[in-house]
Amino acid sequence: MDGTNNFVIGIPNFSISIALLYKNESVAGVIYQPIIDQTYSAIKNGGTYVNGRRIKVNNVIDKNKTTVAYICGYKIDRDYLGKLMFSLVGAGCKRVLYNWSGAHDYCLLALGKIESIITDNIEFHDFAAGKLIALEAGAKIIDFSGEEEKDYTNTKFILSNASEINKYIFSIIKPLQEGR
């Protein structure tokens, strides 16, 4: 389950996330959101679906219309989190989400409801299905050095609907990474 804390305190934003791995890479992923009865699924090189309907990321590349989700592990520097949120909004992002349910955020990107996700040091099992679901819906990925990600198990990456948005988000977070 992803969003366990949300579930425990009664916030209806949680998901069940399952991935099938082959050599530390997801080859199939399913995320079920029981409150809204939506099932997201993806098979490597087979696209992404919600309740059987094919979905894709959106094509918004206007930074002032960009909604970004931030997903982090339990051990987060709260000072860094504040600076990051301030920097994203200050740079012109429309909105920054901090939902406490990363699986839900990957589904939002795949469905075309948001433009980008910053994934910052979470457990592999927390993103194994969601990362595949977003990528198969057309998301682009870079690591925190701004390069195309080469290690699927990397825990720090940016997923966006377009390479231009990845570059934009990276330009905002890069100065914050120095000395971290």
Image (cartoon, rainbow, N blue to C red):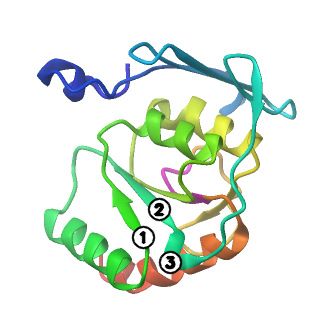
State whether residue 12 is above or below residue 87: above
Which callout, 1 or 2, points at the residue further toward the start of the chain? 2
Side of 132 relative to 17 (left or right): right
Q: Amino acid at mark 2?
A: Thr
Give residue 180's quadrant in the image: bottom left
In three-dimensional space, the C-alpha distance between marks 1 and 2, rounded to whole angstroms, equals 5 Å
Q: Which mark is drawn over residue 94?
A: 1
Side of 27 relative to 77 (left or right): right
180 vs 65, nearest the viewer: 65
In three-dimensional space, the C-alpha distance between marks 3 and 1, rounded to whole angstroms, equals 5 Å
- In percent of width and height, residue 118 lies at 46, 59
Q: Look at mark 2 in the image and give the residue it sits on.
A: 67
For the magenta stretch, what is the residue range?
154-159
Q: Which mark is drawn over residue 64?
A: 3
148 vs 114, nearest the viewer: 114
**Local crowd at mark 1 within 10 Å, few (<14), some, or many (≥20)?**
some
Q: Which mark is drawn over residue 174?
A: none
Query: What kind of element bears circle 3?
Result: helix
- In percent of width and height, residue 40 lies at 62, 24
**Local crowd at mark 3 within 10 Å, few (<14), some, or many (≥20)?**
few
In three-dimensional space, the C-alpha distance between marks 2 and 3, rounded to whole angstroms, equals 9 Å
- In percent of width and height, residue 103 lies at 47, 33
Residue at 50% x, 13% y: name it: 37
CB contact under 8 Å: marks 3 and 1: yes
